[in-house]
């Protein structure tokens, strides 16, 4: 969607509109311009400027273009091309804002004595991968992936602990409960999620969102690509290695 757009031409607020649209294309069909402005936390003027940069006459044409795109995707669903959303993602991470977020993540990791990766399901597998990859690089970390693991019993102070919480929706109850428990004990929280304004971001000291189109099977199994998460984890660890002077195992 909007494949030829130069994201660097968009302002911060216009980028918020773009990210909301590609994350919720079906929902856009039910929203007025005022409702979209409220959902994306921008003004209707920002949406109008976004439409102009898309060479569209206005919001009505924007909805038509999105509807047409959705119909095209529906016809070609069986041959879904992952390269399209990934191209959008890699264009986004070329922006200075992403470098700043990653630098903050590395700084928080260097200041921590232990790093805990939290996630369940597919995100749990990625949490385990992130912890192992960081351990290979000389970091001290582990993964917490048990959805029914009991909460802390003793009153530990975890102010030198960094929690990296992985959640596609940012609304997974068990993950939120674990993150809140760490937060109460003064741990620093980084949220890696597909939704910038999800509940987990309210607990986070830093949020990195990747805005991939959400896909699921007929029985509602989440099929949203996690390639961006792997990229984020590996990029973080490699920058951690460089900043800390550690040498990863070969």
Image (cartoon, grey):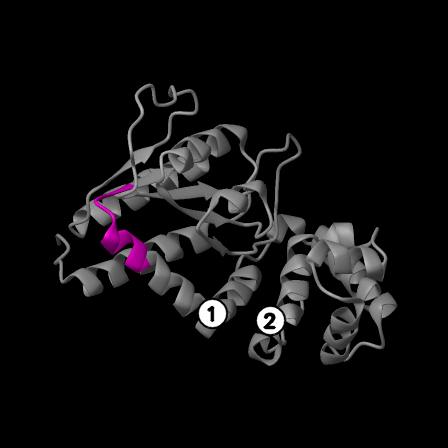
Q: Which residue is at a point 66% across and 58% down the rendered structure image?
A: 20
Which label number is shown at residue 12?
Answer: 2
Magenta span dominant secondary structure: helix
Q: Which residues are magenta?
A: 106-115
Mark 1, residue position: 97
Q: Is residue 220 above or below residue 112?
A: above
> Is 108 covered by the magenta stretch?
yes
In terms of image quadrants, where is residue 122? top left
Query: Looking at the rendering, which quadrant does residue 231 occupy?
Result: bottom left
Q: Position of residue 204 (x, y in %)?
A: 46, 47
Which quarter shows the C terminus?
A: bottom left
Q: Nearer the viewer, residue 123 or 78?
A: 123
Element type at mark 2: helix
Q: Please give left or right for residue 160 compared with residue 85 in the image.
A: left
**10 Å crowding of disc 2: few (<14), some (14-19), many (20+):** few
**Horizontally, is 250 left or right of 37 in the view?**
left
């Amino acid at each position: 969607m909007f494949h030829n757009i130069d994201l660097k031409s968009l302002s911060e607020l216009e980028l918020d509109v773009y990210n909301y649209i590609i994350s919720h294309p079906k929902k856009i069909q039910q929203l007025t311009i005022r409702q979209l402005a409220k959902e994306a936390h921008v003004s209707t003027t920002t949406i109008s400027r976004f439409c102009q940069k898309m060479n569209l006459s206005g919001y009505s044409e924007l909805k038509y273009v999105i509807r047409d795109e959705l119909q095209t995707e529906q016809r070609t669903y069986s041959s879904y091309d992952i390269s399209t959303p990934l191209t959008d993602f890699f264009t986004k991470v070329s922006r200075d804002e992403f470098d700043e977020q990653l630098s903050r993540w590395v700084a928080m990791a260097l200041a921590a004595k232990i790093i805990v990766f939290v996630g369940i399901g597919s995100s749990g597998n990625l949490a385990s991968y992130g912890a192992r990859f960081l351990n290979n690089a000389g970091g001290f970390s582990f993964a917490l992936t048990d959805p029914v693991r009991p909460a802390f019993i003793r009153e530990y102070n975890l102010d030198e602990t960094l929690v990296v919480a992985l959640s596609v929706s940012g609304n997974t109850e068990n993950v939120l409960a674990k993150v809140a428990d760490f937060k109460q004990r003064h741990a620093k929280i980084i949220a890696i999620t597909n939704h910038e304004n999800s509940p987990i971001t309210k607990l986070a000291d830093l949020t990195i969102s990747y805005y991939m189109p959400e896909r699921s099977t007929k029985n509602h199994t989440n099929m949203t690509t996690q390639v961006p998460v792997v990229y984020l984890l590996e990029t973080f660890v490699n920058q951690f290695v460089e900043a800390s002077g550690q040498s990863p195992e070969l």
